[in-house]
């Protein structure tokens, strides 16, 4: 799948239309809008990464069993005392406090 680039129509007030288009890596930047022919400039935009993300998948990945199986430890802070208690993993102390 080719990368997606963002472009803005060049307008005097700086508020030109922004659009995205798939382009091959070897293609140069566009100089005009493919439909209207108006001048455009490529803009930097945050990448749109498409992952299979869901609340259930996140819960499964961050579950205590999965973290332990993967060799990680997880600590959760007790808001009353400020002490972190281990909730997953085998390595490390059972608790972490400021005094430790």
Image (cartoon, rainbow, N blue to C red):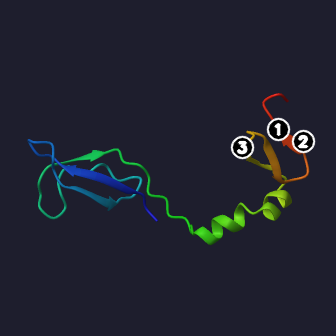
**Which class describes the residues within 10 Å of circle 2: few (<14), some (14-19), or many (20+)?**
few
Q: Nearer the viewer, mark 3 or mark 1?
A: 3
Q: Nearer the viewer, mark 3 or mark 2?
A: 3
Using the rendered view, name the quadrant where residue 20 is placed. bottom left
Mark 1, residue position: 96
Q: Residue at x 15, y 50 (%)?
A: 16
Label 3 vs label 2: CA separation?
A: 20 Å
Tell which of 45 and 21 is nearer to you.
Answer: 45
Mark 2 lies on a secondary structure that is: loop
Give the image location of residue 85, x and y in percent: 81, 47
Residue farthest toward the top in the current orientation of the protein: 99
Above or below, 86 relative to 59? above
Above or below, 51 relative to 98? below
Mark 3 lies on a secondary structure that is: loop
Residue 63 — which label?
none
Give the image location of residue 99, x and y in percent: 82, 28
- How many marks the image carries: the answer is 3
Using the rendered view, name the quadrant where residue 66 is placed. bottom right
Q: Earlier in the sequence, mark 3 or mark 2?
A: 3
Mark 3, residue position: 80
Q: Are marks 2 and 1 in contact (CB under 8 Å)?
A: yes
**Which class describes the residues within 10 Å of circle 1: few (<14), some (14-19), or many (20+)?**
some
Give the left or right position of residue 32, taking residue 21 as reference: left
Give the image location of residue 71, x and y in percent: 85, 53
**Which class describes the residues within 10 Å of circle 3: few (<14), some (14-19), or many (20+)?**
few
Q: Residue at x 64, y 69 (%)?
A: 57
Label 2 vs label 1: CA separation?
A: 7 Å
Is residue 45 in sight in this rendering?
Answer: yes
Q: Earlier in the sequence, mark 3 or mark 1?
A: 3
Mark 2, residue position: 93
Q: Are marks 3 and 2 in contact (CB under 8 Å)?
A: no
């Amino acid at each position: 799948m080719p990368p997606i680039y963002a472009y803005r129509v060049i307008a005097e007030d700086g508020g030109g239309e922004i659009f995205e288009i798939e382009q091959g890596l070897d293609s140069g930047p566009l100089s005009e809008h493919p439909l209207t022919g108006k001048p455009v400039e490529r803009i930097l935009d945050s990448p749109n990464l498409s992952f299979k993300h869901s609340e259930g998948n996140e819960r499964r990945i961050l579950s205590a069993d999965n973290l332990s199986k993967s060799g990680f430890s997880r600590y959760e802070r007790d808001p009353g005392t400020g002490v972190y208690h281990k909730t997953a993993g085998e390595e490390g102390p059972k608790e972490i406090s400021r005094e430790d």
